[in-house]
Image: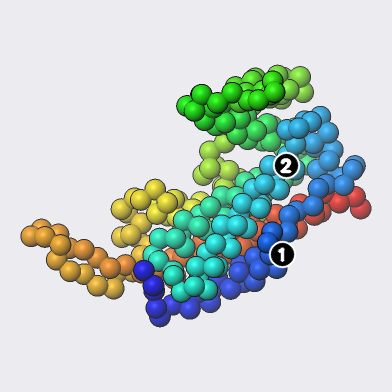
Amino acid sequence: MKQTGFKYAYLQPLFTDIESLRGEGVYRQLPAPQASSSIATDDAPLGEYAASTLIRASFAAGVAHADALRRLRDAGEMDPTSPWTLLRGSLENFATAAWLLGAGSDRPERRLRTLRLWREDMRNRAQHEEITAHVPEDGGKTGRERVQEIEALALSLGIAHPRAKPQAGKVIEEAAEGAGLAPKKATAVWNAASGFAHGRYWPNLRVSTPIDALRGGPDHYLMALVINEDEHRPLARYTHDFLKHVQNRYIARATVH
């Protein structure tokens, strides 16, 4: 559905920064942390389960989601749902990176967060392997073995409770607090966007604008909806705020001064 009459000017600051990260067929990645930097020190005992790996992957995914929305805007194909779902993906990605970078000077907490997320990552991998009956080649470890390895690593480092699954809403709330944003408001816009992503009914009533209706039967109507820019604008703003925070925080902690 092509949507006319909307300029989406409020998205331009985000899109400008996203465009600056585009290269020749690739997106510019966050750099690897320098030796002896704060992040490298966090990562040292974690081996292949480094925080920097997850942070850089989350950031790259967030950029790709936001750039997909930019390309839809340029094509004039902005439907009522995709702007919510794509920025929901970006917000989660950037907030996850911010969450891993956060916790102030509490290095054990940052390592705990990292191992919790790695464990969940490998648990999801194990589920996929078991469903598809996939066996790693050349003696590679399964997802289930990786989960056990992460738990053993946490135990060896004196890190308790790595089994607690990171909850997206809590991650966003804690990341917003660490980034100096409004935790409840950031979580609220993510919640509305998640409603669209999961095909829920309520966000259409709460954060969309009806422009037409026609009778779909004797007891119901079909509604034509467009994006309510006043409701979508905070999602774009928090997504952009998290993007800038991650860039600045990562470079500060990945560089030896």
* Residue drawn at point x = 39 percent, y = 78 percent: 4
Residue 185 drawn above or below residue 69: above
Q: Is residue 28 left or right of residue 162?
A: right
Above or below 149: residue 113? below
The percent coordinates of residue 203 (x first, y second) are 36, 56
Whether residue 99 is visible to the viewer of this picture, yes or no, is yes
Residue 52, image quadrant: top right
Give residue 23's mark.
1
Horizontally, is 49 left or right of 80 in the view? Answer: right
Q: What amino acid is labelled 1 in the image?
A: Gly
Against 227, residue 36 (above or below) is above
Closer to us: 93 or 252: 93
Residue type for callout 2 = Thr
- Residue 256 image point, x, y percent: 90, 50
Location of residue 253 with respect to 148 vertically, above or below: below
Describe the colour scheme in one phrase.
rainbow
Tell me the SS state at disc 1: loop
Q: Position of residue 29 (x, y in %)?
A: 73, 55
The 10 Å Cα crowd at callout 2, few under 14, some 14 to 19, many 20 or more, is some
* Disc 1 from disc 2: Cα separation: 21 Å
Residue projecting furthest to the left: 218
- Crowding near the residue tagged with mark 1, few <14, some 14–19, many ≥20 C-alpha atoms within 10 Å: few
Pick out the residue farthest to the front.
138
Percent across and percent down for residue 107 are: 77, 36
Q: Residue at x 28, y 68 (%)?
A: 224
Residue that numbered label 2 is attached to: 53
